[in-house]
Amino acid sequence: MKEEIREQIAAEKAEEKINTIFSAVAADLTAYAEDYALWQARGETGTEPPTPPNFEEIAEAQGLTAGRSELVAPVDAAEEPGIGRSFELVPDPGSRFGIRQRSWLEMMFGEGSMDLRPQTSRDMLGNRFLSWKTQDQPEFVPTFAAARENVEKAWRIIEARGLAQEQAEELANQAKTRDVSLEQLSTDRGDVSMTQVGPFAWFDLASGMPQLSQPPGVFLPGDEFMQAVFSLAPGESTVAFNEPKTVCYCIRLLSLTPPESELRAQFFERRDDMMPIDQVAQQSYAGVFERWIEGLEDRYNLRWERQPRMPRR
């Protein structure tokens, strides 16, 4: 308990320090946004606009890491490690628990999002982000010449999925029939890499609400990946894609701790606390709803010419 208390106190102090730094940086960014809005409103031709903040200097002074991106669409931004899947918990009187998770994508691309407004978010690993949108380009249909590189990249990814799955299944079969480790197979072949990951749980409760865990060494795992992992018995192997289906993993479960019997006992001991179970059930329901929509799209041959807009909140 002593070590847990120390870790909690240290985490609280770190959180307080980060909040102080982020508040100071956000105040500077907001001041610039207000000055820029006034300059635009006055319409003073021939005058120079306010000088924007130097992010690199601010980050260096505050011990942060600065970064910027070119114009990016929501579907591409979602695949950015860390910030692409980050979120913030915000009050929501209409929800069952009075709070909801607001994704970074909603902050940047959702209806009512504004330019030059600082936004804070965090990922499942505890990393914190302070970001703002500097430009919002209206939707348009690009020429084929402009879109060709992205189209070719997407086509290659889709065509490669079958080959990647075949190779992963071949590794799984070899591991089973030859009774060798995936590490040995990767060494023998030389065209694949092996990483030992974990231990990790299906869901992470660090933020107070169950979130799909993001174990280091696995790129953007989704429910399909977790379902495959936790369906295995120790020593068994299987294959599964990550959520965006850009990586196919050959997986071998080394151990399950605690054993399934103990996990079941813990579940029954905590059955009076239904909030975490209800939250996980809501996420599962959302997955069922998404699959139902996908089924309707397949049944009626619906093809989107562009990604649907963010839903109203």
Image (cartoon, grey):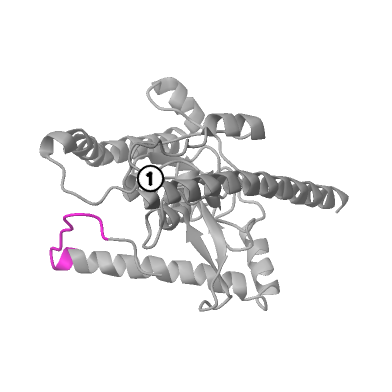
Q: Relative to the observer, which residue lies in front, 117 or 162?
A: 117
Q: Give the image location of residue 305, x and y in percent.
A: 16, 55
Residue 221 visible in this rendered orientation of the protein? no
Task: Left or right? Give the position of 293 relative to 184.
Answer: left
Looking at the rendering, the stretch of residues picked out in magenta corresponds to 298-308
The amino acid type of the residue labelled 1 equals: Ala
Q: Give the image location of residue 224, x and y in percent.
A: 41, 54
Q: Relative to the observer, which residue lies in front, 25 or 52?
A: 52
Neighbours of disc 1 within 10 Å: few (<14), some (14-19), many (20+): some
Task: Left or right? Give the position of 222 relative to 4.
Answer: left
* Residue for badge 1: 77
- Dominant SS of magenta comes to loop
Residue at horizontal 51 percent and vertical 50 percent from the top: 118
Above/below status of 17 relative to 294: above
Above/below status of 104 relative to 150: below
* Quadrant assignment, res 89: bottom right
Residue at horizontal 66 percent and vertical 75 percent from the top: 273
Q: Give the image location of residue 201, x and y in percent.
A: 59, 53
| Quadrant of the rendering where the C terminus is positioned | bottom left
Task: Left or right? Give the position of 208 relative to 2.
Answer: left
Q: Relative to the observer, which residue lies in front, 282 or 311?
A: 311
Residue at horizontal 23 percent and vertical 51 percent from the top: 139
User: In the image, is residue 301 part of the stretch drawn in magenta?
Assistant: yes
Q: Give the image location of residue 37, x and y in percent.
A: 43, 50
Residue at horizontal 46 percent and vertical 67 percent from the top: 283
Residue 215 visible in this rendered orientation of the protein? yes
